[in-house]
Image (tube, helix red, strand yellow):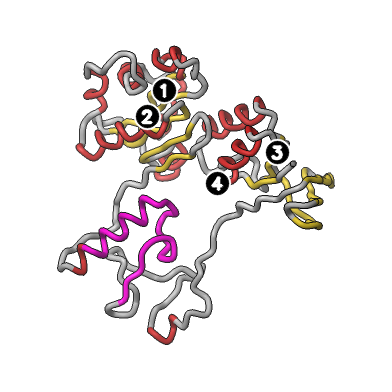
Amino acid sequence: MSPCDWGGYVGIELSQAMRRFGSKVSVIDRNDRLLHREDDDVTEALRRLFEDEGIDILLNAQIKRISGKSGQSVKIVLEQNGLEKTLEGSHVLVAAGRTPNTEGLGLDLAGVELTNRGYVKVNERLETTSPGIWAIGEVAGSPQFTHISIDDFRVVRDNLAGGNHVTTGRQVPFCVFTDPEFARIGLSEKEAKAQGVAYRLFKIPMEGVLRARTLSETRGFLKALVETDGDRILGFTAVAVDGGEIMSSVQIAMIAGLPYTAFRDAVLTHPTLVEGLGALFSSEPSAQNQRMRMAH
């Protein structure tokens, strides 16, 4: 079996899963990197991971034609860097994003407006443009994670009870369940640069985390962004075994408003993966990152 995939979050999770089930897998992405909106070190780590596992990655590729029937026999003709290629396999997984299921519901008759992308238009309280009608989850254009939909429910519940709960400024953690995992909370480097936010960068390889060595799971890294004029943690990224669990520890600290020095000076249990946060925040930004900060 040789499924073809697309290089977003869902696509890469299922690509690795199908490969480990024994399938030959090709990942097709029109962009120049997997998860191209993420930092380059994240996308490079995923590229190396997939190549090591024997997954064929086709970047800068445009689909020209697809024929056949998924589950039986499929042929895909694509163009990559000006050259036409043909892939043949038994299955195609299309992980090209989701569209809201709002067409034909008669929402306009109820005075509920849609955005230009077809999502229900809501304000920060998740109220629609029609009084007394609310929308939650992905149909309201919220970040497409189950935990965000659950929080949307809490926002509407509280507001129906007379509160003033808003979605403005809420944290949006996420984890991509590859092996190792990719997890992030807060700003990435790309986002910080785009917003003109100055930062100090702390980064260590998982080789520097003692628990990762005992597990023989040293692929990946931990990194954190800290404000330059204070000690507040702006963002955290893990490409690591149980990266989502490590990230959650940092998220709780961010919720509590703890400075990065709280991790640096904490006595963390040895040997645990979270112990690596002590090593991370005890490291020093590299000279390259110092220059990046000065450029801001």
Q: Main secondary structure of the magenta part?
A: helix
Closer to us: 224 or 156: 156
Residue 203's disc number: 1
Q: CA distance from mark 1 to mark 4?
A: 27 Å
Residue 10's disc number: 4
Three-letter code, disc 3? Val
Q: CA distance from mark 1 to mark 3?
A: 32 Å
Verify CB contact (< 8 Å) between mark 1 and mark 3: no
Verify CB contact (< 8 Å) between mark 2 and mark 1: yes
Q: Which residue is mark 3?
A: 25
Q: Is residue 143 one of those drawn in magenta?
A: yes
Circle 1 SS class = strand
Left or right for 200, reference 217: left
Q: Residues within 10 Å of mark 3 (few under 14, many from 20)?
A: many
- Image depth: mark 1 or mark 4 in front: 4
Q: Mark 2 or 1 closer to N-term?
A: 1
Circle 4 SS class = helix
At which x and y percent is residue 288?
Answer: 46, 22
Q: Is residue 174 one of those drawn in magenta?
A: no
- Image depth: mark 2 or mark 3 in front: 3
Asked which quadrant contains residue 237, the reply is top left
Closer to us: 232 or 28: 28
